[in-house]
Image (cartoon, rainbow, N blue to C red):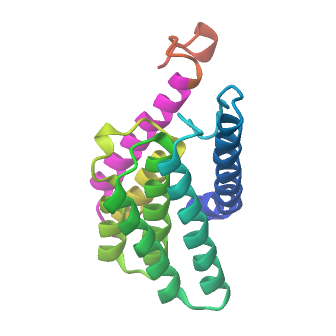
Amino acid sequence: MNGAVFTQRWRQPLRQVLWVLGLWACVFGLALEGVGCAKAQVDLAGAQSAGDESTMALVAIAVDFHKKADLALAEGRREDARKEMEELLGVCERYQVRTVEGWDVKFDAATRLARLHLEDNNLPAAEVAAQRGLAGAEEAPPTLFHGYLLQTLADVKEKQDDPRGSVENHTRAIQVFKGVLDAQRGGLPPRESDGGTP
């Protein structure tokens, strides 16, 4: 089985679970603050603040757009599904919610839009979608969704017969994923048992 296809298959249900859990976590965090309890600490995809209303609103919007895209695809309306992701990406660009979850909403929307174009062999549109998602990403923290978007751009470059561009973006993805691992370890250097490779 093609590796990209396999990755996309298992990541699709994961994305849906993350957005639902993320929305629940944000709402739950605000509820706790409203009754005077200690602020809820949510560790979901690198969450910074469960009580951030802008983040909560953007995650809620993402749930709606992804669901509408799912329904469109189920009915064979691929163009409508692309339009849903285009609109979600536009929302991200307009409001620029610069929390970890805010970045991930943007990265995920761009990844899905690029993949839709890639599946239709519209390589120029796929690259544009990926690059839109990566705009300003040098300010973003390393997250899984950031890495997935770079992998998608690498796949686009490969289909464009640009092996150098593909390798470059796979290398960027590796660095992002290493950043995720480093963050999980608290920035500690790798153990000797890990092979000593950062």
* Quadrant showing the N terminus: bottom right
Q: Residue extending furthest front?
A: 35
For the residue pair 28 and 170, the one nearer the viewer reads as 28
Q: Residue at x 54, y 35 (%)?
A: 49
Compared to residue 182, the image places residue 106 above or below, namely below
Per the picture, the main secondary structure of the magenta-coloured stretch is helix
Residue 159 in view here: no
For the residue pair 78 and 39, the one nearer the viewer reads as 39
Q: Is residue 31 left or right of residue 131?
A: right
Q: Residue extending furthest bottom?
A: 76
Q: Is residue 166 magenta?
A: yes
Report x, y in % for residue 100.
48, 41
Q: Is residue 189 left or right of residue 26?
A: left
For the residue pair 195 and 41, the one nearer the viewer reads as 41
Report x, y in % for residue 185.
58, 18
Q: Is residue 103 left or right of residue 59?
A: left
Compared to residue 22, the image places residue 69 above or below, namely below
Report x, y in % for residue 150.
41, 51
Over which residues does the magenta segment extend?
A: 159-183
Q: Is residue 160 magenta?
A: yes
Q: Quadrant of residue 95?
A: bottom left
